[in-house]
Amino acid sequence: MLKLSDAAALADSRGEAAAPPELLHLAGRYRLDRVTQSVLEDLRQRLSRKGVSLTDFRQIYLPYIKELLNAGVANGSLKEVPSFFDYDLPPLPFQACCPPWLEDFSAHCARATLVRYEGIIRRFLNTYWGDTDLRGLDGPAVDAYRSYYLEQRDGAPSLFPSHTAILYSILDFYVAKAIAERGQGAPPPPREKPLLLKDVAPYWLESLPETTPTALKEAYKAHLEQYILPNLGLSDLRKFNPRRIRDYQTALKHSRGAPFFKTHVDILNQILRYAAKSGLMDAIPTLRVPKKRQPRVTHPEPPSLPPYDRMMEVINSDPSGLDVLIVRLAWQLGLFSDEIRFLKWSQLDLAANTAHVADREIPIPDELCGYLSKRRGTASSDSYVICTESHPEPYSNSHIFRSAQELLWRFGLGHLSFEEVRQDYYRRQKDAYIKKQLGSARKGDPAPG
């Protein structure tokens, strides 16, 4: 099947008109039998961004494309020339066309984007473009406006792309509307409004249970404002994936937030669960911290799973040790370092064997419940679990990690990280659930005949 570039070469060999500028560069690879109305409109938009006006496309480019298609029919490469929209639109004065476009645009854009665009239109575009016919919008017209915006209005160069985006979007809106009205093609599907992280995060903070310590809420807010929202605030929650998390991890390496990356992933997971629970989005897989690539070694590596019997030795080694309590909360309840730091006795319902942490309730094993009861003593409900008389305020993250690591080293488990100890809680819960389900299935099996 002939391509546009092949048909143009044949036309040129016969002495016919040469191909219009930019056409073969953008569409030379198009097969003649695949040039449809939607393909043609996509080409028109791409040429528009290259400085070709709607009028020039209609008078120069469209007739040449039809000539190539007619040549394909004559050559036997194409059965017939499709019926295309003629792009003959009435005048499109900017000020008259802007309000209907804004009304349509507001239905599928973020509120902040709409406010920014309205300001650009009011301050700059209305003044310059006025009743200018957008059918003549081309490269020289955009260049002239750029000079006006930068030199006469002292505009910021970084904001200029937003101005051209508005102009092209208005033109595309009216072309698509005309194509749909004349039955030449289906209207573009409505775009789903993005679910931006910066819009959902404040509501998640407000939704945290009343039992969540104020200090933990403030820590979450600080992480959001200082690190997460500046990097991911304009990201669509529906499009979060492992690659985005890896990119965010790379961005953190250039700031002081790298040590808090795992905490940030936990915060993002909590926000995603809140959005799914609130009906804002469908449930998605849990985000995970990217695994580090381990160097190839010749000697056998120690197992990464904490051995149960050794861990029991660790947690029973010193009932009064603060480091033992930290490891217990990570290994027996699966708490993150921030949750351990800010955990208060009011969050532990020892009578009901339940811990209320962030947005979840965690059953407390009987043995751990008895241990915590002895640890609490006469401590008030507002005091922190991880504290001492000389240090009643929350410890730092580095202190939590260092205390746990030093304790593990003393028992020959220094190869384990705090995160591996914490994740072992969820592995054991999963194994227990599977065993329970298998046991239930065996009990329900029919008796052998």
Image (cartoon, rainbow, N blue to C red):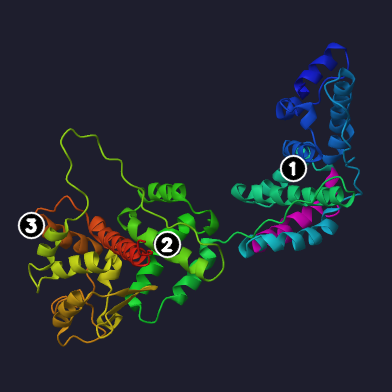
| C-alpha separation, residue under disc 1 versus residue under disc 3 | 70 Å
| Residue underneath mark 1 | 142
Give the crowd class for mark 2: few <14, some 14-19, many >=20 residues within 10 Å: some
| Residue underneath mark 2 | 269
Q: Are marks 1 and 3 in contact (CB under 8 Å)?
A: no
Where does the image place residue 206, in percent across and percent down from the top left? 46, 76
**Which residue range is magenta in the image?**
115-135
Residue placed furthest toward the front: 449
Q: How many marks can you see? A: 3
| Residue underneath mark 3 | 410
The answer to whether residue 338 is above or below residue 243 is: below
Mark with earlier residue (1, 3): 1
**Which is more toward the observer, 124 or 435?**
435
Circle 3: element type: helix
**Which is more toward the observer, 165 or 183?**
183
Say what amino acid the circle numbered 3 marks: Arg
Q: Quadrant of residue 19?
A: top right
Say what amino acid the circle numbered 2 marks: Asn
Q: Quadrant of the N terminus?
A: top right
Where does the image place residue 63, in percent across and percent down from the top left? 89, 30
Asked if one can make out residue 236 in the rendered structure from this viewpoint, the answer is no
**Which is more toward the observer, 254 or 269?**
269
| C-alpha separation, residue under disc 1 versus residue under disc 2 | 44 Å
Q: Nearer the viewer, mark 1 or mark 3?
A: 3
Say what amino acid the circle numbered 1 marks: Val
